[in-house]
Image (tube, rainbow, N blue to C red):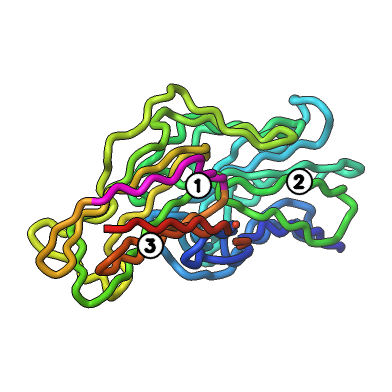
């Protein structure tokens, strides 16, 4: 008997010290077996922490899947069904069903629309017209707020025996800060403010858009704080500085650096006006602190996507 397959892929890269477009690594396979039911299978990836940056992270949070077989909302096969990485008959796999009696069959002469949202805790939906809606997104430390992913919707006729990729992509914007400098420079604190703080609502439509409730901007928030200690600027602050997930927007960001050059203390604000914090984009702001200057740059590429902004501030 013929098999039909669906591939829900997590393709592409982690981010370099610039902006890149991010996809989830590895793949989860949605398989139609010989009895014409839809099941799930997966491949191993590398784990990460709070962000859903690869397949192992996706396995920890699961996803919800939607499927339609027609042009009306009633033609529904999956309606936000939980898909978990669980043991079924001794084998780890993606599963929405407890046993074979609850697996969903393919219907003949139908064209299916599929999509998915991760994590399962997301408040979202996919319409029969292929439009995603997600509400309640919040900006903050990457370790503390939800990293939302949606899969590119795909259609496939039930008669087709081919792979269809549904790429999971991040829909928040990620921001990081790095610092380098000469041997006589020490950094005590890096702060950042300026992004809109309200909850965000996402709608994919023809042009994916984010709406943010409220116009307030955040007070300064620590990106790095050495406390009683100091950070020597001859190496980057990547491991010490907190990354943020921010509801996509255009913002005027202000960074406040507190540092020493030898025994001299400085507190310098650096403003970046009209910075586009785009969805599925990781922007890294790179500071080089020297005895006579702060050199500032921000970068954005494909992969998370890349732009350069350079600023020099004299002491």
Where is residue 120? Give x, y as percent: 49, 43
* Closer to the eye: label 3 or 2: 3
Left or right: where does residue 221 sit relative to residue 61?
left
Cα separation, mark 1 vs mark 2, equals 38 Å
- Secondary structure, mark 1, is strand
User: Is 22 located above or below residue 288 in the figure?
Assistant: above
Disc 3 designates what residue?
295
Q: Position of residue 54 (x, y in %)?
A: 51, 62
Q: Secondary structure at mark 3?
A: strand
Query: For the magenta stretch, what is the residue range?
Result: 268-279
Q: In the image, residue 119 lies at what x, y percent? A: 49, 46
- Magenta span: helix, strand or loop, mainly? strand
* Left or right, 36 with reference to 219: right
Q: Are marks 3 and 1 in contact (CB under 8 Å)?
A: no
Which circle marks residue 101 in the picture?
A: none
Report how far apart the C-alphas of labels 3 and 2 lie in the structure.
Answer: 60 Å
Pointer 1 residue = 173
Quadrant assignment, res 205: top right
* Lower position in the chain sequence, tag 3 or tag 1: 1
Residue 105 marker:
2
């Amino acid at each position: 008997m013929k098999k039909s397959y669906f591939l829900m892929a997590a393709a592409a890269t982690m981010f370099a010290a610039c902006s890149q477009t991010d996809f989830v690594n590895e793949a989860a396979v949605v398989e139609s077996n010989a009895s014409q039911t839809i099941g799930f299978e997966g491949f191993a990836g590398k784990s990460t922490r709070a962000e859903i940056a690869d397949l192992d992270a996706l396995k920890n949070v699961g996803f919800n899947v939607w499927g339609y077989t027609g042009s009306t909302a009633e033609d529904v096969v999956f309606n936000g069904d939980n898909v978990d990485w669980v043991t079924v008959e001794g084998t780890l796999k993606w599963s929405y069903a407890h046993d074979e009696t609850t697996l969903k069959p393919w219907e003949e002469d139908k064209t299916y629309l599929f999509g998915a949202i991760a994590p399962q805790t997301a408040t979202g939906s996919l319409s029969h017209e292929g439009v995603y809606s997600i509400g309640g997104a919040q900006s903050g430390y990457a370790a503390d707020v939800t990293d939302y992913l949606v899969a590119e919707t795909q259609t496939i006729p039930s008669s087709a025996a081919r792979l269809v990729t549904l790429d999971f992509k991040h829909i928040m914007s990620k921001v990081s800060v790095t610092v380098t400098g000469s041997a006589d420079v020490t950094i005590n604190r890096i702060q950042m403010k300026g992004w809109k703080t309200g909850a965000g609502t996402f709608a994919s439509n023809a042009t994916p858009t984010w709406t943010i409730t409220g116009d307030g901007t955040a007070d300064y928030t620590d990106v790095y704080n050495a406390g009683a200690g100091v950070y020597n600027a001859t190496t980057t602050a990547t491991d010490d500085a907190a990354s943020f997930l921010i509801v996509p927007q255009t913002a005027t960001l202000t960074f406040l650096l507190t540092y020493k050059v030898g025994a001299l203390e400085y507190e310098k604000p650096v403003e970046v006006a009209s910075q586009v914090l785009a969805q599925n984009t990781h922007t890294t702001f790179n500071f080089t602190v020297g005895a006579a200057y702060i050199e500032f740059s921000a970068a954005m590429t494909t992969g998370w996507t890349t732009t350069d902004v350079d600023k020099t501030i004299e002491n």
